[in-house]
Image: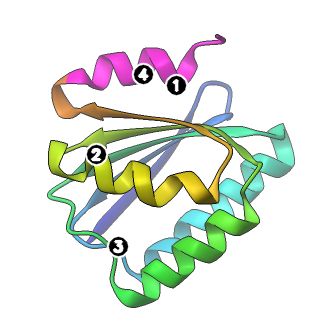
Amino acid sequence: MTVEIEQFGNGKILLVRVTGQLDKQDYERFAPEVERLVEQHGKVRVMLETNDFQGWDAGALWEDIKFSVKNFNNIERLAVVGEKKWEKGMATFCKPFTTAKIRFFEHDQKGEALVWIESQE
């Protein structure tokens, strides 16, 4: 598993690149970054880019639920860039845990995802 985290959009947008399967340690790296940005900017936006994504292990799933409940109102937009097979599952799983606008983009639509995550509409 690899997780890379990068800020852009004046620090209000967090780009998270994930390869493989998420585990609890990944959330221990990711969650503090989101919380720090929320402290600085209020609501933030997250662009999650997945490659060869294999879901969550049990520890990561629990961390994801805790993270989502804690940040229910803090994430304004979530763009998920990845394989089509994850689209329905990710959208269904995320919706009850956030007020964020969520959109899924396939890898070849990454440019559109960037435009959407940065747009003011």
Residue at left 75%, top 48%? 74
Specify the amino acid type for callout 1: Ile
Residue 79 located left or right of residue 52: right
Protein image colouring = rainbow
Question: Which residue is the site of mark 3?
Answer: 22
- Characterize the magenta stretch by its predominant secondary structure: helix
Q: Residues within 10 Å of mark 1 (few under 14, many from 20)?
A: many
Question: Which residue is the site of mark 2?
Answer: 87
Answer yes or no: do the residues labelled 2 and 1 have beta carbons within 8 Å?
no
Specify the amino acid type for callout 3: Leu
Residue 105 located left or right of residue 11: left
Q: What span is in magenta?
A: 109-121
Location of the C terminus by quadrant is top right
Q: Which structural element holds mark 1? A: helix
Q: Earlier in the sequence, mark 2 or mark 1?
A: 2
Q: Residues within 10 Å of mark 3 (few under 14, many from 20)?
A: many
Specify the amino acid type for callout 2: Glu
Q: Residues within 10 Å of mark 2 (few under 14, many from 20)?
A: some
Q: Toward which corner of the image does residue 44 lie, by quadrant?
A: top right
Specify the amino acid type for callout 4: Leu
Q: Earlier in the sequence, mark 4 or mark 3?
A: 3
